[in-house]
Amino acid sequence: MEPSKKDKIRALLKSIETGDTGPVAVVNEAKYIQHNPQTHEGSEGLAVLFKRLSLTSPRVNIVRAFEDGDFVFAHTEYDFAKRNIGFEVFRFEDGQAVEHWDNIQCRQGPNAAGHSMVDGPTEAEDHVLTEANRTLVRSFVETVLVGGEMERMADYLAKDYTEYNPRMCGLVDLRAALESSHETGKAIDYQRVHRVLAEGSFVLCVSEGIAKGKHSAFYDLFRVMDGRIVEHWDTTEKVALKAEWKNDNGKF
């Protein structure tokens, strides 16, 4: 049986650790578009790059991986001398990966509730509700996070909502961070939604805005059950200044 797209991406990401050159075949390097602004495009083949990285004794753990049509999105943890948490997004065309985005943050925490940035369920459920869950999450992000309608939070979040952000542990902390961003210009300020990917109960939203006064990318992963958001994971990464970009494709 042909491996699924997400299994191919799991193997590709794991090959950073192992140095195995086989999984790199999933990438069409002739068409590959790299959206990590700090990664050169076309200067070094992925097989060579991954082989070189493997010599540094990296550790790669693919915590969650999901598939949405031509897209695969994965929640990962890396140890390349320092521990990072990331989200990786790949777009497929004719059976190969042709485009890549990511968002990486230093691992922090656990938060005050004892949750790490990667704890919790890993398998998607309720696949028949994929589109309903995508719509719910998009509405939440556009209404509450971007629009600042704090009074609408209860329309979207479950009473037993669990937060995995290392600086928050529940609804009170979440609301405080969002209210400060909209009222005082501090903390976080969501400004634009770029993409919403979903498989069953898991939905990833890619957004742009300001964090601590810096142009930033927000990747938010939500788990939805019974029409409510029950869990949330995220990474926030500063977008490099354009003068520092190593390719011209843009972060988003």
Image (cartoon, rainbow, N blue to C red):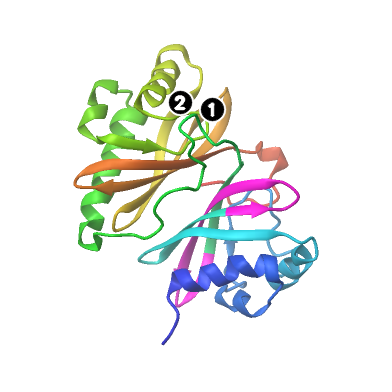
Task: Tell me if I can see residue 242 in this picture.
Answer: yes
Which is more toward the observer, 126 or 45?
126
Is residue 26 in the magenta section? Answer: no
Q: Looking at the image, is mark 1 or mark 2 earlier in the sequence?
A: 2
Residue at horizontal 45%, vertical 72%? 5
Q: Quadrant of residue 153?
A: top left
Residue 222 is situated, as x and y percent measured from the top left of the image, at 36, 45
Residue 170 is situated, as x and y percent measured from the top left of the image, at 38, 29
Which is more toward the observer, 244 or 165?
165
Residue at horizontal 43%, vertical 30%? 169
What residue is shown with label 2? 189
- Between the C-alphas of marks 1 and 2, the distance is 6 Å
Q: Secondary structure at mark 1?
A: strand
In the picture, which quadrant includes the N terminus? bottom left
Task: Tell me if I can see residue 250 in this picture.
Answer: no
Q: Looking at the picture, does residue 217 appear above or below residue 94?
A: above
Cβ–Cβ under 8 Å for marks 1 and 2: yes
Highlighted range, magenta: 77-98
Residue 184 is situated, as x and y percent measured from the top left of the image, at 46, 12
Which is more toward the observer, 159 or 188?
159
Amino acid type, mark 2: Asp
What residue is shown with label 1? 211
Q: Secondary structure at mark 2?
A: strand
**Going by the image, does 230 lie left or right of 120?**
left
Query: Callout 1 environment at 10 Å: few (<14), some (14 to 19), or many (20+)?
Result: many
Q: Looking at the picture, does residue 246 appear above or below residue 143?
A: below
